């Protein structure tokens, strides 16, 4: 089997590539990465040493994509993953859309030409910020919890029926548009499409920042005693996200390769769910016990697009694909902490 992985030198792309080769040592992988993300260049030669054909190129460049070898499947891991992209003064709105949406269109054209299957790693940020802000929450054990259930929300988290009506953020809108186009291309040109909406992906080697890769950013910052602060929601760190290691995606992706015609919804959640969820305040308690004390400042005013609680319910994908996360959250945190201790300059390298 031959596959193409975009964004292969990023954290998620590189972990998936290594994991696939572990399960399928005869797999032929081609990867493409622009190396725009600082730190991604550190994965280039190690991936090539594994026999992966890694090309330095940009998904926004149609010629770069069409010049790639023919593959049977495309795993799209290339994206600007920041919810603040387009409004942070670093990336313009047009740059964000060109990368996240224009790049997807080029990949879908590649799939149309070669009749390749398309696997899109999407995000929980495709859900309506306005509706998420309306969720009634209460504080229990230093963390927000929904105080009632509603359409699209159960005790297991948000399901796939929750509203995707704007506002989503420009980032969320770019990913939602990519989802819609992928499904349209697949139905129109008859190639398989699967969209895996992920919660927060985390693990050692992630390029953590305050607006993305929050578990990695927090632990690395704590280990090196860099400034940290609770932003918004009264500055108490009660906001909650779930957590998943990207290597846990690998068995699912292999099943999706092998059974493209399975009667399963094309868009499904892939996350650690409620069992993996944690607030920043709870993460700080863990960091104190593991890494020692550190002062966290407060900034009560929220940033744009901040939400109090986001946990995805993955029960539908458990039913459809018999998939469950394999790596407990505490193991993920320990893995990141060990990496932080071995690489105290990590945040300088990747930020």
Image (cartoon, grey):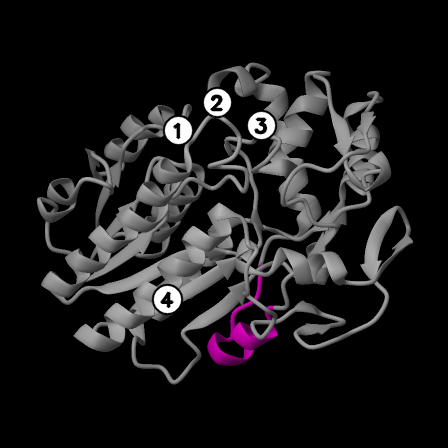
The residue segment tinted magenta is: 314-325
Nearer to us of marks 1 and 4 is 4
Cα distance, mark 1 to mark 3?
19 Å
Nearer to us of marks 3 and 2 is 2
Residue 144 placed where, x, y %? 83, 53
Cα distance, mark 3 to mark 2?
14 Å
Q: Residues within 10 Å of mark 3 (few under 14, many from 20)?
A: some
Q: Secondary structure at mark 1?
A: loop
> In screen coordinates, is 225 left or right of 247?
right
Cα distance, mark 2 to mark 1?
8 Å
Nearer to us of marks 3 and 4 is 4
Question: Residue at image x 42%, y 43%?
Answer: 15
User: Residue 164 versus residue 117: which sits nearer the camera?
Assistant: 164
Q: Is residue 197 magenta?
A: no
Nearer to us of marks 1 and 3 is 1
Nearer to us of marks 4 and 2 is 4
Residue bearing mark 4 = 180
Q: Residues within 10 Å of mark 1 (few under 14, many from 20)?
A: some
> In screen coordinates, is 37 left or right of 270?
left
Which mark is on residue 350?
A: 2
| Residue 8 quadrant | top left
Q: Residues within 10 Å of mark 2 (few under 14, many from 20)?
A: some
Disc 2 + disc 1, Cβ < 8 Å: yes
Which mark is on residue 37?
A: 1
Observer able to see residue 261: yes
Q: Secondary structure at mark 4?
A: helix
Residue 186 placed where, x, y %? 25, 71
| Residue 316 quadrant | bottom right
Which mark is on residue 339?
A: 3
Q: Secondary structure at mark 3?
A: helix
Residue 265 placed where, x, y %? 44, 78
């Amino acid at each position: 089997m031959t596959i193409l992985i975009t964004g292969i030198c990023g954290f998620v792309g590189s972990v998936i590539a290594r994991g696939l080769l572990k399960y399928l040592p005869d797999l032929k992988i081609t990867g493409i990465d622009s190396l725009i993300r600082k730190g991604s260049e550190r994965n280039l030669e190690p991936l090539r040493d594994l026999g992966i054909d890694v090309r330095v190129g940009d998904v926004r460049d149609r010629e770069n994509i069409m010049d790639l070898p023919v593959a049977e499947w495309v795993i799209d891991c290339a994206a600007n993953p920041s919810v603040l992209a387009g409004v942070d003064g670093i990336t313009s709105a047009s740059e964000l859309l060109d990368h996240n949406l224009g790049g997807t269109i080029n990949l879908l054209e590649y799939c149309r030409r070669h009749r390749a299957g398309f696997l899109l790693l999407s995000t929980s940020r495709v859900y309506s910020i306005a509706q998420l802000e309306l969720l009634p929450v209460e504080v229990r054990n230093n963390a927000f919890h929904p105080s009632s259930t509603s359409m699209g929300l159960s005790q297991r988290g948000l399901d796939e029926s929750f509203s995707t009506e704007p506002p989503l953020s420009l980032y969320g809108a770019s990913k939602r548009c990519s989802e819609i186009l992928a499904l349209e291309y697949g139905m129109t040109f008859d190639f398989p499409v699967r969209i895996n909406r992920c919660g927060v992906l985390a693990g050692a080697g992630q390029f953590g920042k305050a607006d993305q890769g929050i578990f990695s950013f927090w632990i690395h910052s704590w280990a090196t005693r860099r400034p940290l602060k609770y932003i918004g929601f009264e500055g108490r760190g009660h906001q909650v996200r779930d957590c998943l290691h990207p290597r846990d995606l690998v068995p699912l992706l292999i099943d999706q390769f092998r059974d493209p015609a399975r009667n399963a919804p094309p868009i499904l959640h892939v996350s650690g769910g409620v069992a993996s969820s944690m607030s920043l305040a709870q993460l700080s308690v863990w960091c104190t016990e593991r890494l020692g004390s550190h002062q966290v400042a407060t900034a009560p005013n929220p940033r744009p697009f901040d939400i109090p609680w986001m946990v995805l319910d993955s029960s539908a994908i458990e039913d459809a694909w018999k998939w469950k996360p394999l790596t407990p959250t505490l193991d993920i945190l320990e893995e990141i902490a060990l990496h932080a201790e071995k690489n105290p300059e990590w945040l300088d390298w990747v930020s």
